[in-house]
Amino acid sequence: MGLNKLIKQCAKNDQRAQKEIYQLFAGKLYSICLKYSKNKQEAQDNFQDGFITIFNKIGQFNFEGSFEGWLKRIMVNTVLLKYRKKPVLNIVTEEIPDEVIVDIDDDEISLDFLLNLIQELPDRYRMVFNLYVLDGYSHKEISEMMQIAEGTSKSNLARARAILKQKIEIHQNGLQSV
Amino acid sequence: MRDYKNIDRIFQENLKDFEVFPPNMSWDAIEKKLIAKPVKRRIPFWIKLSSIAALFVVLFSVGTIYLLPKIDFTKNFLIENTSIIKADKTDTITQKKAVNKSSNTTNYNSLNAENKSLVIEATSFNNSANSLEDEKEHKTANNKLQLNKFLISDSNKNPFNITEETKKTANKNSKFTVATIFAPIYINSFGDGSGVDSQFKNNPTSGNSSYSYGVKLAYQLNNKFTVQSGVNLINLGYTTNNIYINPSASVIGFSNLSAEPLVSRNAVSTSKNTAVNASNSNTGNLNQVFGYVEIPLELKYNITDGKFGVNLVGGFSTLLLNKDEVFIETSSFSQSLGSSNNLRSVNFSGNIGVDIDYLIHKNLYINVSPMFKMQTNTFSKNSGSIQPYYLGVYTGLNYKF
């Protein structure tokens, strides 16, 4: 069955089509949830909520543009909605460096370790870091999506980078000292 | 291998093809929620709209077909009428003979004196005829007075009583709306015929512009449907054109007029020129004026929400006759001929139309509602196949409780 036909079947609440769509995109969408959420448990909750939103709104997909992009946006928005409301202490740093360089040994860095670092970031830092660094949104887009000022988005990103750098360095130093 | 790297690039490179499958229980949880909350079945708009339209057509048909007793236009009440007319005829003829022998019977174009009605021209210079005339005028004056009294008491009673009732009921429920109504009315008819007499079947007829006013009470059943009723007073006028009138003293009997034959008011003034006028008949009109207390029962379906509401309206009205008079009109005079006896005291109309309302303040709406109302059993007999309808643009101020 073609993807478009599957989408149409889903709009008619066809359970078999829903399961097929789920199987096609579950991996990609769950990965998004893992990156944007605080831990595995919250990632699973967000993933389920996001998929239910997707099936409820699938009738609104207009077959223009990528279906995968549409799914990802819904998933990101589902998570954003959850964390947007939670206040985060806003630290405005005077200097916002464009680049943060870290001394790293590639062989010692695992994917799980990096994912853990992201998840451990405070909610809003994690959102901004994911949106800007991993998903390529601009600060202007992020400010609209998260309903924050552009400057706040920039400072959040800088704080996220600083925390990540610090944690990577501790990790590296720990390994060295062993 | 140790290296100095941009922190962004570390994450981008490592997480580029990151894909992890969720645990199996995730799908079960999603499936459960999807079954528990099935997507509301969407009924296409056109199906909704056409089914509503069909419902209104059914209501309209009920109003026009099933609520009225069978009308038998072929059934003629002539036996009764002719006997009365005969009696009148003998009276007038004897009078006529006694007074003056120069009597004429005029043949009307569309009139068959033998069969249906009789117009006897009674020319008279005599005092006794004058006294007869006075007596008749007195009678009609009395009739009018009674009619007026009835109208006044009626118009006083009905609308105000109802508003009191509606206020009482409205207070109990917040879904009630009360409204004032005013509407210019244009009446016309399908089919041939005249409400005055079937002899004028082929005469051109036309409706007169009139008006209706009253109060309306509406109850909102749900966010789409509203039931509305109320009380309106409505005045209708109906003109039968091209009636030939001989402007001399005439005794007129129409089969559908319950008034006794009348001697025209012009009798004295024109009678001197009888010889001339008898050949130069004037053209005039018969104006049948009737009024009803209208009690509509209508269903309203809301198409759009928001400040502007567009609704479809369908239903029927019960019409109670409260005014009935026939006038003869020419360029030179107007004369009441009494009341019709063929207007049913209760009849119905099928109503269909649109209602557009606009929210002006909190609970206050104005509405404009063009309505088409087809009357059913207006006339009981001798009217041809006439089927009056009227168009009205009902405007009102609505207050929602």
Image (cartoon, coloured by chain):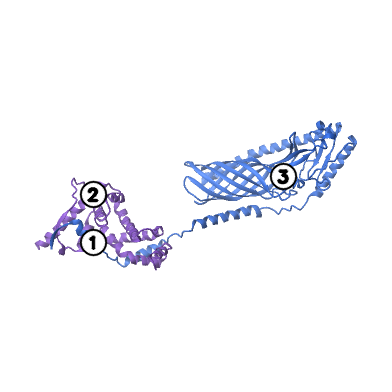
Chain colours: A purple, B blue
Q: Determine the chain carrying the residue at label 2.
A: A
Q: Nearer the viewer, residue A110 or B168?
A: A110
Q: Determine the chain carrying the residue at label 1.
A: B
What residue type is disc 1 on? Leu
- Marks 1 and 3: CB-CB under 8 Å? no
Residue B230 spot, x, y in % from top left: 59, 45
Query: Dot 3: within a 10 Å radius of its alpha carbon, few (fewer than 14), some, or many (20 or more) residues?
Result: some
- Please state, as top left, top right, bottom left or bottom right, where the N terminus of chain B lies in the image: bottom left
- Marks 2 and 3: CB-CB under 8 Å? no
Quadrant in the picture for residue B279: top right
Q: Name the residue under label 3.
A: B204
Placement of A15 over or under B365, stated as above or below: below
Tag in front: 2 or 3: 3
Residue A178 left/right relative to A156: left
Q: Determine the chain carrying the residue at label 3.
A: B
Same subunit: marks 1 and 3: yes
Give how far apart the Cα atoms at labels 2 and 1 are. Answer: 22 Å
Query: Dot 2: within a 10 Å radius of its alpha carbon, few (fewer than 14), some, or many (20 or more) residues?
Result: many
Give how far apart the Cα atoms at labels 1 and 3 are. Answer: 90 Å
Q: Name the residue under label 1.
A: B15
Tag in front: 1 or 3: 3
Give how far apart the Cα atoms at labels 2 and 3 are. Answer: 86 Å
Tag 3 or tag 1, which sits nearer the N-term? 1
Q: Residue B134 carries which label?
A: none
Q: Mark 2 points at which residue?
A: A154
Residue B231 left/right relative to B87: left
Residue A134 spot, x, y in % from top left: 25, 57
Placement of A109 over or under B160, stated as above or below: below
Same subunit: marks 2 and 3: no
What residue type is disc 2 on? Lys
Badge 3 marks a residue whose secondary structure is loop
What residue type is disc 3 on? Pro
